[in-house]
Amino acid sequence: MYTQISKLSQYIGQEVTLKGWLNNKRSSGSIAFLELRDGSGFIQCVVSKKEVTEEIWSEVEKSTQESSVEITGIVSKHPKQVDLYELQAKSYKLIQLSIDYPIANKDHGPEFLMDNRHLWLRSKKQWAILRVRDVVITAINGYLHSQGFIKVDSPIFTPNACEGTTTLFAVPYFDEGSAYLSQSGQLYIEAAIASVGRCYDFGPVFRAEKSKTKRHLSEFWMMDAEGAFIEHEENLQIQEGLIKYIIKKTLENCQVELNILERNIEPLKKVLELPFIRLTYKEAIKKLTELGSDIKYGEDLGNDDEGLLTKDSAVPVFIEKWDKGIKPFYMKLDQEDPTRVLNDDLIAIEGAGEIIGGSQREDNFDLLLERIRHEGLSEKEYEWYTDLRKYGSVPHSGFGIGLERMVRWMTGVEHIRECIPFPRTINRLKP
Ligand code: ATP
């Protein structure tokens, strides 16, 4: 019976066939320990020379790391570890012999590993990260649907910028001149809420900013959510609910993976128990000044500032109601204090930095137009967007979460480039 490693608990004492790749091999001359991986998990297969034919034993002997193989044997519980199984091999087939696999089970430098990303993905740690990434994606989709959001999609080729052109990748586009790769689908899903009420997009976005930090990619996956009749307060509640749901699902479904990644899960468990902290931008600046930062009112928070604000915090911190001067034109002015907007950045703990940016959107036609003019943006280009404020405008809010930032936090890996299968950064386009 052909099955997968993840299903072996159903087959104790029975004969099964597994197909996969050799992760590792140790041999003592008369007994070989083969670590097999099949994508669903890892298992130790034991081949005893005296239990198999000479032909099979010689196949085992010549097998190397990453050879593709098929092993048939009896499933038993691992003698020492719970929830782990072993396969006592009876038969063995080498599908393809892997010769001189470049990534040995030893330390390699990051550049070498990145050059070999197509192979590096097979390593245990990268396998674990890919699986956590999948659980985070599934959790995001699940939570949003539970809150009445449906997935609509936004275009990747866009004619104009959401927030200026300096960080956009331009591409030639037929007779239209340049198109720009989207850096957020927000404006488009704002249009879709008047059709479906609550919706989101989830796909790759592109930023041409020359950031060389451990949390910036030039291509990353973003989920933008948007909802009609959602105001600032509810927007924050949805964001907090989403983050807690992602953590809960990651802890439930990724025990093996988090263990491989040596992730201390205590801080994540704690986040589930407490409400998130909220600071206004003004309060954040005051606190930062007290903590020794030289940040001035009206400036954006740097990486160090985000670290300072969250260093003693057990939960993520919302920084809300920023000065309107440093935020984009579409954010709604706060009626209580029109020098600021109804927005938030959510800063995660454990040095993970900003993971969400959100806001209530300006729904008043005249005010929106005034902001567009004030920022020197083209009224014509944004005509379709301002149209949305002409025909049944409603209060609405939304936010964007960076998938890889979230995966980086959940896995605890240091560099964001490991949180996407094939990273694109300022100095990496291959493989
Ligand atoms: P930062 O200040 O950290 O550069 P930002 O303010 O430009 O981020 P937004 O435009 O609000 O970010 O984007 C929403 C979310 O997308 C961020 O909170 C973050 O999770 C993610 N994000 C933004 N830029 C990047 C990037 N270059 N690489 C990976 N994720 C990113």
Image (cartoon, helix red, strand yellow):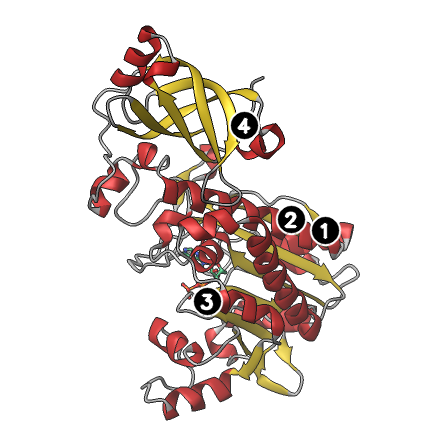
The residues tagged by marks 4 and 1 sit, at their Cα atoms, a distance apart of: 30 Å
Q: CA distance from mark 2 to mark 4?
A: 26 Å
Q: Does residue 381 appear anywhere in the picture?
A: no
Question: Which amino acid lies under the numbered mark 4 shown in the image of this protein?
Answer: Gln
Rendered location of residue 253, percent (x, y)? 58, 49
Residue named by callout 1? 145
Q: Is residue 294 above or below residue 272?
A: below
Marks 3 and 1 close (CB-CB < 8 Å):
no
Element under disc 2: helix
Residue ID for mark 3: 354
Q: Quadrant of ligand 1?
A: bottom left
Task: Work out whether 84 lies above or below 184.
Answer: above
Tag 3: residue type?
Glu
Do callouts 2 and 1 mark residues in contact (Cβ within 8 Å)?
yes
Q: Which numbered tag is attached to residue 141?
A: 2
- Which residue corresponds to the image point at 49% horizontal and 47% vertical from the top-left? 256
Q: Earlier in the sequence, mark 3 or mark 4?
A: 4
Q: Cα distance, mark 2 to mark 1?
A: 6 Å
User: In the picture shown, does residue 412 fall above or below 295?
Assistant: above
Please indicate whether residue 88 sits to the left or right of residue 112 in the image.
Answer: right
Q: Judge from the rendering whether residue 359 lies leftward or rightward of residue 307; answer left or right.
A: right
Q: Residues within 10 Å of mark 1 (few under 14, many from 20)?
A: some
Label ID, residue 4: 4
Residue lying farthest right? 392
In the image, 110 versus 229, the foreground residue is 110
